Amino acid sequence: MTSFVGANITKTYTAADLTGAESGKAPRLGDTYESYDGKVYKFVQYDTGAGPVAAVSGNVCYYYAPGGVSAGATGVVTSDLSDSAGLGAGVLQAAPADGEYCWIQIKGPATLTTALTAGADGNALTAVGSTDGTLDVSALVTDSIVAYAVDASAKIVMCDFPY
């Protein structure tokens, strides 16, 4: 994993972009980028999952775990909560098609497209108990905390996703 300078975080990439003549100019799976404002992004591949659930920019995605069983992969994400092990990965910055690559925000403030399932300002948030593309209030000590509600009614969260 390397840090990437000057990333276009709203661009999507195909497999050909990563292996063709432009491959030296494209990010690699797992690369991270820290912007001037302290937000941190990770480069991942998107999978629509069994749903299939299309990617939506500004929605939360989860580490892909087919049928809810994790195989330890952290380079592929989905917005299909049923095809995750309940571990949030980040906030999509683009809307890639199935199998395409994109950036997700993993640290710093973000405004979600889809409202939180529940919660109030200051609440710790998790993928557990939420619906596709969003987060819910953490209810158990075993829930993986991935963000905090800054302004729940405005869908603003402070991202703290694991990577």
Image (cartoon, helix red, strand yellow):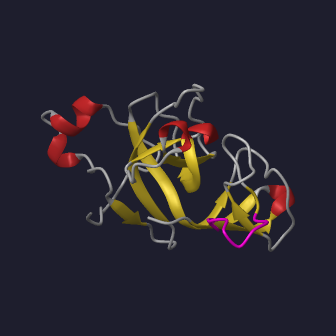
Membership of 142 in magenta stretch: yes
Magenta stretch, main secondary structure class: loop
User: Closer to the camera, 11 or 91?
Assistant: 91
Is 55 placed above or below 33 here? Answer: above
User: Closer to the camera, 63 or 46?
Assistant: 63
23 vs 61, left or right, is left
Whole-percent x, y for residue 82 in the image:
62, 38
32 vs 24, left or right, is right
Q: Quadrant of the C terminus?
A: bottom left
- Residue numbers of the magenta segment: 138-146
Whole-percent x, y for residue 83 in the image:
55, 38
The residue positioned 60% from the left and 26% from the top of the image is: 51
User: Closer to the camera, 86 or 42?
Assistant: 86
The residue positioned 45% from the left and 60% from the top of the image is: 41
Labels in figure, total:
0
Q: Quadrant of the N terminus?
A: bottom left
User: Closer to the camera, 12 or 122?
Assistant: 122
The residue positioned 23% from the left and 30% from the top of the image is: 16
Is 91 placed above or below 151 here? Answer: above
Whole-percent x, y for residue 154 in the image:
82, 57
